[in-house]
Amino acid sequence: MENGPLICPKLRPVESVFVQDPTHGHALMLRDTEGIAERAVVLPATLAAIVARFNGARSYAQIAAEASRAEGRSIDAALVAQTAEKLDAACMLDTPHFRARRRDAIEKFVAAPVRPAAHAGGAYPGDPGRLARYIQEECLAKAPPRAHRGAMVGLCSPHMDLWRAAHGYGHAYRALSEALPAGVSVFILLGTSHAAMRRPFAVCDKAFATPLGALSPDRDAIRELADASQFDVHEEQYLHKREHSIEFQAVFLRHLLGGRAATIVPILCGLCDVQASGGDPSRDTLAESFILALRRVVERRRGRVMIIAGADLAHVGPRFGDRRPLDARGQALLAERDRRSIDLSLARDARGFFADVARDLETRRVCGLGPIYTMLRVLPPSQGERLHYAQCIDPEEGSIVSHASLGFYADA
């Protein structure tokens, strides 16, 4: 018989970070990267020991006893029950209530012809005029012109919010604006799935709305991927619903293109068990069938296709569960560690890059592993160049998200 939330609560695979909150001070924030819950839940950090034990196998009394021992203070079952009920109401627990909401959300997303601009007005300006000015003045204009390198065929860009990563985006998309071939009309957008995936990739066949206008899907390319892959590439397309890693690239791309006609192939890269285990993705039958299909899509459109990966690098510090922020020496060591991964990317060593990042994935938490690896596997012959690197440091508690902008230019 299925255990309900009032017996053995089970937390869904949600993102857990520590933040400073006006009400709770040091707080635990739970965010639904799957996009089913309407909003994040913020709890006092003192409840983290309770929430961490919501695994579906412990009763309220067991959780209270274990959390009490771990925290060195008395925690009663009533507090555990109250916490579970709050999280269930917010769709953070795996319960019949959540599953019903999930079915409804998936049905609505599948039926909709357009994927809305989910983060407009939050992570970037929602007003078209203000957004265009911000991109032009705070991003592109702040990046220096680059020496001519020929036609760009691939780009790695940040996927942080525009406010924090303005310079990174500026370097990436100014370089693209200066080296985008006139004949390119198809953009393959590779993004990180911040939600857990059951399949290695998820393709979305909807138009992506932005405040500056929509980008239409390339249905021919998507059909080729669907036909050649050994799994349903649309099975988890609903994960695109609130995923920001591709949305932010669509915003910059629409601004850059203006009225120029173009289509996109939006792909979330999870790589599933292979990424978690650190194995060789080329030995995973499902993942490899998709990557080979994507490579053929690129080869058949040589000269007309551009590959863009929205990918950040490290996530370290108290926000992500570390005990303390990095000091100056730690930041320098992180930059050197990131540099080794970046150099493998620039050398287009897909296998070496994957193995290098997988080695400390649990501690460095590089969330761009999937899209960068996939890009390296399908790029046409090209030379890589580092355009920009930055560590975005939280001014309050010192946590860091690092990112790099990389350009790949066609061999002469």
Image (cartoon, grey):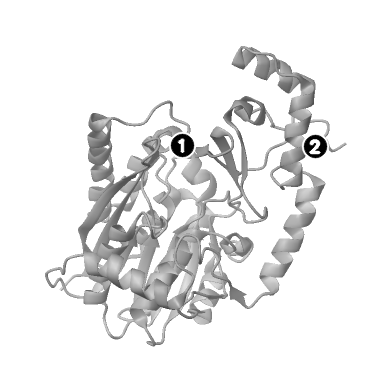
Q: Residues within 10 Å of mark 1 (few under 14, many from 20)?
A: many
From the viewer's perspective, tell me whether residue 315 is left or right of residue 106.
left
Say above or below: 287 vs 328: below
In the rendered image, which residue does mark 2 sit on?
5
Say above or below: 287 vs 4: below
In the rendered image, which residue does mark 1 sit on?
319
Kind of residue at badge 2: Pro
Q: Return the residue nearer the eye: 100 or 395.
A: 395
- Among the 4 quarters of the image, the one containing residue 147: bottom left
Residue beneath the point at 32% across and 47% down = 353
- Among the 4 quarters of the image, the one containing residue 138: bottom left
How far from the left and from the top, in percent, is residue 143?
21, 64
Identify the residue at the far right of this view: 1
Identify the residue at the far front of this view: 22
Residue beneath the point at 58% across and 48% down = 196
Q: Residues within 10 Å of mark 2 (few under 14, many from 20)?
A: many
Kind of residue at badge 1: Arg
